[in-house]
Image (cartoon, grey):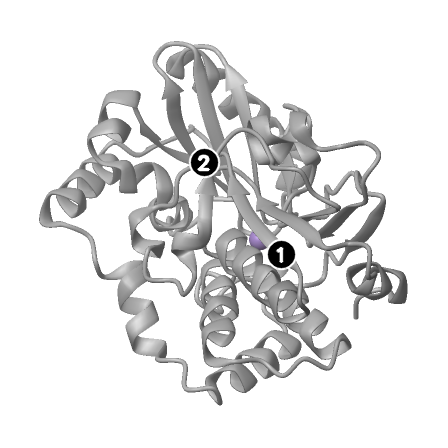
Amino acid sequence: MPPKKLVAELKKKNHKVFVVSAHIHLEGDALGSELAVASLLRRMGKTVYCVNDDQVPAEYLFLPGIKTIRRGAVFPAYDAAVLVDCSDASRIGKLSKSLRPDKPLINIDHHISNTRFGTLNWVEPKASCASEMVYQLFEALSMPLNKQEAVLLYTGILADTGSFRYASTSSVTHRVAAHLLEFGVNVYNIYQRLYEDFSYETVKALAGVVRGMRRDKTGKVAWVQVPAALGKKYPVLSEQTDEIIRFARAVAGVEVALLFKEIRRGREVRVNFRSRGRVDVNALAHGFGGGGHRMASGCTLKGTLKGVIAKVVAATARRCS
Ligand SMILES: [Mn+2]
């Protein structure tokens, strides 16, 4: 449950204007928890601005309230800021520069690598996702959920648990999800929006990425790559990290699956790590300046696609041996 101090902070009368944000590379949990927090605060009588440095992926445009999100690099004037699903303040991108040191910064997150960057920190590494935590925030404030908020939180849970498959899925997760369904959430509709709404061309491109899968000589490390040109042509490829990486993780004998996405051609590569359980990929990503969870993590590295792959695969193979 959220710390009492955090609940009190949200309630403070002199906190009239809130800004709410989440990490770049927006996905279901970031968006679901951000919009649900914003909705909660508005119902408490606050003025709320949702601002993100990154664009909203197409498959999430159905989320209730998605149009209230502004894309920008600067926050408007505010009394308090809430960051959700961020292990570090830098995860909100350029916006982090406009966080005001004289204003409260509320950190709600479930990453084990969280740096406790806030003036108030609520970090639950055991929570399956930030949305599960925001559900508890509604409870702590005795604020009954509405259907829109239930859709947001359910979408966050679905996205971050890999549709209730990952080890982070707990009995709490299922209990929360069960309660959310009581508000009339259409499970099948949300599933289709997230996972069965790709264009024919996109699925063919995805098949090409899977065809390009490689593994090291031990068979413990497998990886797929999305060069910048391909990512630009099919943006979904750079957003559907889990959908792509699961092919590499599905190979028997693989301990760690990797996805390399070239963000800036020849200069910058995003790396996603997924573990089968034995190797702590949070520690692995940490070694490259990133982080995340024990089973799923990421980092961003400078260099060419080829160079980054060689370096990261070698480091990963060492951890697997
Ligand atoms: Mn999350």
Question: Depth check: 229 or 41 in front?
Answer: 41
Answer with left or right where residue 142 lies relative to residue 59: right
Vertical side of 227 occupied by 175: above or below: below
Q: Position of residue 279 (x, y in %)?
A: 63, 43
- Mark-to-mark CA distance, 2 and 1: 22 Å
From the image, tell me which residue sits under label 2: 54
From the image, tell me which residue sits under label 1: 47
Question: Depth check: 241 or 281 in front?
Answer: 241
Callout 1 secondary element? strand
Question: Depth check: 74 or 288 in front?
Answer: 74
Residue 317 visible in the picture:
no
Vertical side of 261 occupied by 275: above or below: below
Q: Please give the label number shown on residue 184.
A: none
Q: Amino acid at mark 1?
A: Thr
Q: Quadrant of residue 222?
A: top left
Q: Is mark 2 within 8 Å of ligand 1?
A: no
Q: Position of residue 140 (x, y in %)?
A: 77, 76
Callout 2 secondary element? loop
Q: Amino acid at mark 2?
A: Asp
Mark closer to the chain start, 2 or 1: 1
